[in-house]
Amino acid sequence: MLWINFLHFYQPANADRKKIQEATEKSYERIIRGLEENSNIKFTANISGCLLVRLDEEFKRIDLIRRIKRLVLKKQLELVGSAAYHALLPLVDIRQAREQIVENKRILNKYFGENIKIKGFFFPEMAYSKNTAELISSLGYEWVILDEISGTGKLNNANLNKVYTDSNSKLKVIFRNREFSQTYIPETILNNSFGNNDIVVSATDAELYGLRHIDEPANFEKLLANGGNKNLNTQFISNYIESKKDNPEINLVESSWESSEQELSENKPFDLWFNKTNIIQVKLMELANLAQSLYYKYSNDKNIWWSKWHLVRGLASCTFWWASNKDMRRVFGPIAWNPDQIELGTQELIRSIRDLENSTSLQEKLDAESKFNYILKILWEKHWENYKN
């Protein structure tokens, strides 16, 4: 069996220290140690720029970053590009998307060397759109990994062993197997629960391995050590793509790794983060659009650096995800409702505007404050109406 495994290492730039520490100790250290102890194993991964910066500057874990670099140099870990602060790229200004992609590349070069080869790209939340795919292609990336639903808008309707070419951007495309990826993969492989698949592509958050799922039998370590007697092989995504010479063109569907068939049939590709019937998400998006508009309008403001500092944190997909109120326990997550996290992201957005104090007009200031206060009002009204004792 060939297991192509993609891991997404990410914690928000404004995440609580304890959350990052837990993710590092329970998941990141475990994955890195597993690779160090099994030199035949290869994974492809996105390590978000904002996480790398906090691990270095705040947690002083340059030792951990150096261990990752050694794995990259030993060709056990392949890194890909992404957005430094995990913005949902199709929902932000294209200029902001470009800035975050370029900054992420700069951060990877800082920690892993200027000569690091980065061919692939990970859309945060695997949120694909035609415009952002064209941007990624223009920045020199060669391939992307997407959820299988992006192929046709249907699940279980694509040959997941093939490598395709996006007819729009000409990027090569590999699809993850959603059903397989939504299990605890080491256990699934060891239990022969993957059907007759000789090749399986999985893509998950790195936090699955320890933080979100307690693996008491140590199935992850067993699988890496001997393949669970499954004749297990692993391969980088880039190498797998290069091995496939026939790459038929495909007209991709705008979608994410959480999109449902019904949502796509109703033209709601990013419904988890922006549902037009969800008043909190609608108002958050209005404030986010205003913050971006003012940031670019007043780019010469003396406080523009601080404005950006808050803006990128407010635009992180988490701000909108926590407002969805969706039950994510089927994928080892929580119920996606946390008013404190929503308020934190909302505060970042208003602070990005407040920092432009020497540029914005009185009306612009008042408009922003009105939007901010309205969000907090409806946010806490909903919380106490639905989640009181």
Image (cartoon, helix red, strand yellow):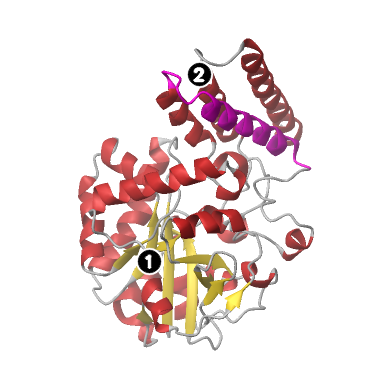
What residue is at 38 percent from the left and 72 percent from the top? Answer: 238
Q: Which residues are magenta?
A: 277-303
The crowd level at tag 2 (other Cα within 10 Å; few <14, some 14-19, many 20+) is many
Horizontal relation, residue 229 to residue 161: left or right: left
Judge left or right: residue 151 versus residue 26. Answer: right
Q: Foreground: 53 or 386?
A: 53
Q: Is residue 35 left or right of residue 155?
A: left
Res 258 quadrant in image: bottom right
Give the number of callouts: 2
Instruction: Evaluate whether residue 389 shows in this view.
Output: no
Residue located at (53% from left, 34% from top): 314
User: Do the residues under discs 1 and 2 have CB atoms within 8 angstroms?
Assistant: no
Q: Quadrant of residue 266?
A: bottom right
Tell us which disc is closer to us: 1 or 2.
2
Three-letter residue code for mark 2 = Leu
Residue under numbered circle 1? 44
Viewer-proximal residue, 261 or 127? 127
Residue 196 lies, in percent from the top left, at: 54, 89
| Residue 314 versus residue 239 in the image, above or below | above
Distance Cα–Cα, label 1 vs label 2: 40 Å
Residue beneath the point at 36% across and 87% down:
229
* Percent of width and height locating residue 220: 38, 69
Mark 1 element type: strand
What amino acid type should be assigned to the residue bearing mark 1? Thr
Q: Which residue is mark 2?
A: 356
Q: Which mark is residue 154?
A: none
Is residue 344 covered in magenta?
no
Q: Position of residue 296 (x, y in %)?
A: 53, 30
Q: Residue at x 49, y 79 (%)?
A: 200
Q: Is residue 338 above or below residue 49?
A: above
Which part of the image, by quadrant, shows the C terminus?
top right
